[in-house]
Amino acid sequence: MKLLVVNGPNLNMLGKRDRNVYGNFTYDDLVRMIEDWAKRNGVEVEVFQSNHEGEIIDRLHRLDFDGLVINPGAFTHYSYAIRDALEIVKVPKVEVHISNIHGREEFRRKSVTAEVCDGQISGLGAYGYILALEYVRKVSSESSK
């Protein structure tokens, strides 16, 4: 089983962004946490990050994964192109946000991508990724039986 974690714009700057919103961990800490989870669970995981919409779409279009966790970053709020790419992806998928997007500025409260995902986890910090990975692993393994 291969799971894909996609991180959008500015997530590579974790640790440098507002720590009151995003916490004290760095992007490397996040990747390490995800890779450690994968190793403990015997799952292959690829962590992909891009600040460019087209690169994210191209990665999704490869369709070489069994489950998806995506934090589209700011693309969450307006990228119908990523939304359409997600709609093509027919595997379990969860949108994740480190901060609670529903408790922030008005423009951050709307997600155009969540409606084509199985669910959304928001506001649980880096732990949200683990919850999302657990879900996609479980559902992916059940659907492959």
Image: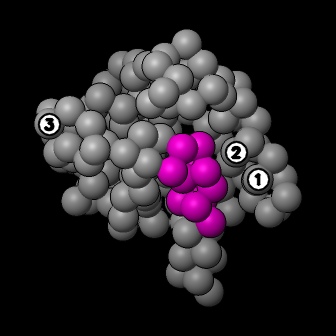
Q: Choose between 31 and 60: the one closer to the eye.
A: 31
Residue 82 placement (x, y as % from top left) = 27, 39
Task: Name above or below for residue 133 compared with residue 125.
Answer: below
Tell me: 5 left or right of 94: right
Query: Visible in this render: residue 12?
Result: no
Q: What residue is drawn where x is 36% and y is 19%?
A: 52
The residue furthest front is 20
Q: Choose between 50 and 101: the one closer to the eye.
A: 101
Kind of residue indicated by mark 3: Glu
Bin the neighbour count of mark 2 within 10 Å (Cα to Cα): few under 14, some 14-19, many 20 and up: many
Do the numbered discs 2 and 3 sit on residues whose CB atoms are within 8 Å?
no
Residue 56 placement (x, y as % from top left) = 39, 31
Residue 60 placement (x, y as % from top left) = 41, 42
**Numbered disc in front, either 2 or 3:** 3
Q: What residue is drawn where x is 85% and y is 58%?
A: 40
Q: What residue is drawn where x is 69% and y is 34%?
A: 31
Q: What residue sits right under mark 2 in the picture?
A: 34
Magenta portion: prevailing SS class: helix
Kind of residue indicated by mark 1: Trp
Bin the neighbour count of mark 1 within 10 Å (Cα to Cα): few under 14, some 14-19, many 20 and up: some
The Cα–Cα distance between marks 1 and 3, rounded to whole angstroms, is 34 Å
Q: What residue sits right under mark 1 in the picture?
A: 37
Do the numbered discs 2 and 1 sit on residues whose CB atoms are within 8 Å?
yes
Residue 106 got which mark?
3
